[in-house]
Amino acid sequence: MNDLIRDKYKRAPHKPGVYIFRGPKNFPLYIGKSIDIKKRLASYVNGRNNLPRIVAMIIIAQDVEWIVTDNELEALVLEANLIRQYKPRYNVALKDDKRYPYLKISREAFPRITVVRHKQNDGAVYFGPYADRIGAMKLGRLIRRLFRIRVCKYNLPTKRKIRACMLKDIGRCIAPCENPDLKEQYQEHVNEVIMFLKGKRMELLDKLKKQMNRASEEMKFEEAAKLRDTISQLTNLLTPQKMDRDTGDSDFVTIAFGGGVGVAMIFRIRQGAMIARQTVSLTIPKKISIEEALGDFVISFYCEDPDTPPRIYIPVEISEPEEIERTLTVIRGAIVTLKIPKRGEKYDIMQLLQRNAELIHGEMMIQKEQVHVPYGVLELERLLQLPKTPNRIEGFDISNFGSQTIVASMVQFIGGKSNKSGYRHYRIKSTDCQDDFASMREVVYRRYRRLLNEDKKLPDLILIDGGKGQLSAALSSLSSLGLEEKIFTISIAKRLDELFLPGRKDSINLPRDSSALRLIKRIRDESHRFAILYSRKSHRKQAMKLELCEIPGIGQKRAEQMLKRFGGTDSIAILSVDKLVEKVKLPRKLAERVLEKLNED
């Protein structure tokens, strides 16, 4: 620690606030808060805070400064805002992840319910984050239908007269746009939505039943019928599995991290029933313990959460639990306690939560290490119901210009892109006639026998250019190698781009505009192009060999030797006699005869 930090520590106040350690170029390294800034800085200056992360931070810290606040709650809010703004290297930060949307109840005279990506300090009430956008949107639609919340974007109340939309006619909205005097009734509906999202289902149902009975007594039968329908739908909807009769309103929180990334998971239990599972991505600094990371997350998460429960269950003892409990109590306005379940059903819930978090973290690590998988590859997996993502695809085609030049090609696509270093071509040896089935059997067998012998990676999917016959030929070779169940194989026919799958009598057709079909056709066309290219090259080579063999004294062996040495007859024709004699050891008279024949034209 440098002398500047020690000198500043002596002048630090005994007041609540936020402190900021700064590194080279004055950029914040770590931001913290305390009810007594000087006492907290003393733990750094005197070396009492010996956590690896903090020790590493102190070594490179160049300066420290602080901002005094009136109370601890203000310090907490300021700390959260500064961490979000600067993203210090040594703080645990919640990722601004677009995958986790929120339900927003706007701050308006007649609030609306919308799905948003980011929480803002705009006075609105936010619930979430939710696991996926589609689920959040469905929940929003359900709430608007049950509680008759408006969907229009009018800035109500407005001076001009507005005609109600059809949602009023079908009983989906009370139409505050048409009648601003309904503000009190509308706000009552909004309060019911908040109770619903907070999991206060029994209180909500009791309240609605009282309203229904009152409406019936007042002979408002239409209103009573609507309330009856709402109660019925809520009763069916809110019958979740009981977790623990004694759990009450509580949250179970855990984290899993490593490799610079982490995930926090929360089970939200209200009135003994789990009403939500939330997942939050984290940026985790190096050299941090689970106790520190979990403590930092609990503070960061619940300082912005509108539904902090009285009990929060965690898997391990976190750093400074009493201070965190006191801070959360101030935020909630009622006592909040942190507990560690040791046995029984609560312990089982925590173990289940931990396993879920570790599974999601494992997926995050795989995604971090893998190349981005294009949509076409994922769509292909979904449409064909493949056992795994076809990240590595190999395509085969047969080409010939007669029985003398039957060749095959194999192209390789990884992550939806061609991998030309993995391309291979083959000269067919097992047949001397145009037999596509026998040729396909041979090339597939040769390819995967070699991969097995060399213990190399097998593809996730094989694509055969052809129909059912070519597919059956490929499958027979894979079966003889014991690979028929290990590599999924399909074929595509040229005429209608129809696909043939193993074990299916009829072909299938993918949507014409699908990314999956475009990917398959691209692989098919590339294997065809590569096969044609090699076939033409082989055909030219065969023609040149026949031309040389017509010269007296040149047999097949000498012709192959000359073509291998010089590449083609054009290259041989421009040589001198001495050069030809020297390079391929031909007798001088034979060399003269060869050059004379090749230069006749």
Image (tube, rainbow, N blue to C red):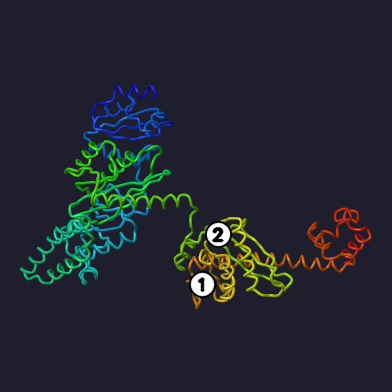
Closer to the camera in the image, 165 or 76: 76
Q: Of label 1 and label 2, which has the lower sequence position?
A: 2
- Residue 393, x across and y down, in percent: 55, 62
- Residue furthest right as drawn: 589
* Residue 98 vertical position relative to residue 426 in the rendered view, above or below: above
Mark 2 Cα-neighbour bin, 10 Å: few <14, some 14–19, many ≥20 = some
Looking at the image, can residue 183 be seen? no
Closer to the camera, 392 or 169?
392
Residue 328 position in % (x across, y down): 22, 42
Q: Is residue 291 left or right of residue 269?
A: right
Residue type (three-letter) at the residue carrying disc 2: Leu
Quadrant location of the N terminus in the rendered image: top left
Quarter of image, res 382: bottom left
Mark 1 to mark 2: distance in Å?
18 Å
Q: Nearer the viewer, residue 310 or 244?
A: 244
- Up-down relation of residue 429 to residue 89 (above or below): below
Q: Is residue 500 above or below residue 356?
A: below
| Mark 1 Cα shell of 10 Å, populated few (<14), some (14-19), many (≥20) | some
Amino acid type of the residue tagged 1 in the rendering: Pro
- Taking the image as shown, residue 184 lies to the left or right of residue 553, namely left
Residue beneath disc 2:
458
| Picture layout, residue 503 above or below residue 198 | below
Say whether residue 106 is visible: yes
Q: Are marks 1 and 2 in contact (CB under 8 Å)?
A: no
Mark count: 2
Q: Which residue was labeled with disc 1?
A: 502
| Secondary structure under the numbered disc 1 in the rendered image | loop
Which quarter of the rendered picture does the C terminus lie within?
bottom right
Residue found farthest to the bottom: 506
- Residue at point 52%, 61% (across, down): 460
Locate residue 254 relative to residue 571 in the image: left or right. left
Which numbered marker is on residue 477?
A: none
